[in-house]
Image (cartoon, rainbow, N blue to C red):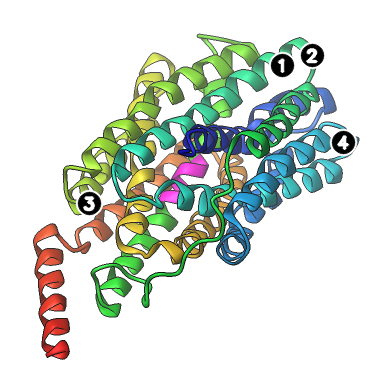
Amino acid sequence: MPNRFLVPFLNLGHLLDHLAMLVFPTAVVAIGREWGRPYAELLPLALGSFIAFGVFAIPAGWLADHWSRYKVMVLFFVGIGVSLFCTGLAQSSWQIALGLTVTGAFAAIYHPVGIAMLVAEPKNMGRLLGWNGLWGNLGLASAALLTGALVDAFGWRAAFFVPGVLCVLAGISFLFLVKDSGKVKKTSKSLGLHVDARMMARIFAIMLIATACGGIIFNSTTISMPKVFDERLSALTQTNFGIGLLVAVVYTMAAFAQVVMGALIDRMELRRLMIGVGLVQIPMLWLAANLDGWAMLVVALFMMLGVFGQIPLNDAIVGRYVADEYRARVLGVRYVVSLGVAAVAVPMIAALHKTAGGFSNVFLVLAVLASGVFIAAWFFPSRAELTAHKETLASREQAQAT
């Protein structure tokens, strides 16, 4: 019997993963008002969560490859649920920081383990990654919307309690409805598929550059968006729910960029798609530094289209060129770079927000980082180069066999 509930639960896990990580950036506005403390002082409480979100990706990937991807995913669902609920009980700043850090540690499981399970079969990989990315972005959107609604209706603690309970229920359902496929079978003698060590090192280096720059851009935009809208779209809304609704609309519409990108991954070479993403991100981030009101809302949409569109590209590189039994560990490395480096976003936003330029300076820095992604993309091997490389390897293996 096919494991028909696996992909739906992996998609749900992606949604809950991003929702869990972005409850605080929306709730912090209400916490600041209740506690009478400034945004720049409270936002760094999330730093530990984003560091843990990256650092724990490698051990999560290693544990999944050596123990069980299935069992580690059960830990993911239940772990983030319990830690979110406990964060809602916090009575002081350090308790919030601790709860968020533990949440980030469990949330770190999803990307190296869930994505590895998703791309275990290369057929329609781009489509699967695209739709999975859409669900992740819906998590971003629902975090802003759900948190804003719960804060306005019941207070900021409910914004942690409700998703916490939902995550635990999802974990219990996963345990009963999804079949355990067992340990990963070891069939490959090397890390790479159809590439030698030298080409693999080149691909990996470019992926890590794009991952590092893209991680900071992604984290900075998603963390700061509720506060950016609070400051620049005040003429459109002045409630937590209104801010959350605007953020949710932008994220939901931009999320479909991943579905489109997933379809393009199955049809076009990755190098061209990476270059195209850079051509969207750079001008949109620059414009975001200089606009407000309706113009900012429109630019934010196109900016997030570029930011979200990059995500399945990096995962597709791993799915296409890394052997299955190594994917969770390689994805762990990728996400420890992406999410670990992305932790820079929290102190960077807090520091730049205090300056005269405020969020304008944040977006200008991100535009520079987007240029780094764009430049790195030009060095990624083209389809023709990879085809020639594969033929050379085949000829070399045939000559050694004879």
Which residue matches tag 3? 270
390 to 317, vertically: above or below: below
CA distance separating discs 2 and 4 = 16 Å
Residue stretch rendered in magenta on the structure: 214-220
Which residue matches tag 2? 154
> Does the residue at mark 4 contact the one at mark 1 (Cβ under 8 Å)?
no
Mark 2 is surrounded, within 10 Å at the Cα level, by few (under 14), some (14 to 19) or many (20 or more) other residues, namely: few
Label located before the other in sequence (3 or 2): 2
Q: Nearer the viewer, residue 179 or 257?
A: 179
> Does the residue at mark 3 contact the one at mark 4 (Cβ under 8 Å)?
no
Quadrant for the C terminus in the image: bottom left
Residue 238 position in % (x across, y down): 61, 11
46 to 192, vertically: above or below: above
Nearest to the eye among marks 1 and 3: give it: 3
At label 4, the amino acid type is Ala
Magenta stretch containing residue 217, yes or no? Answer: yes
Q: Considering the numbered disc 2 on the image, is that residue within a helix, a strand or a loop?
A: helix
Residue 372 lies in quadrant:
bottom left
> Does the residue at mark 2 contact the one at mark 1 (Cβ under 8 Å)?
yes
Residue 277 appears in the figure: yes
At label 3, the amino acid type is Leu
Residue 181 position in % (x across, y down): 54, 51
Mark 4 is surrounded, within 10 Å at the Cα level, by few (under 14), some (14 to 19) or many (20 or more) other residues, namely: some
Label located before the other in sequence (2 or 4): 4
In the orientation shown, which residue stands out farthest toward the right? Answer: 91
- Residue 150 numbered tag: 1
Which residue matches tag 4? 90
Residue 370 position in % (x across, y down): 34, 49
In the orientation shown, which residue stands out farthest toward the front? Answer: 1
At label 1, the amino acid type is Leu
Q: Considering the numbered disc 3 on the image, is that residue within a helix, a strand or a loop?
A: helix
Mark 1 is surrounded, within 10 Å at the Cα level, by few (under 14), some (14 to 19) or many (20 or more) other residues, namely: many
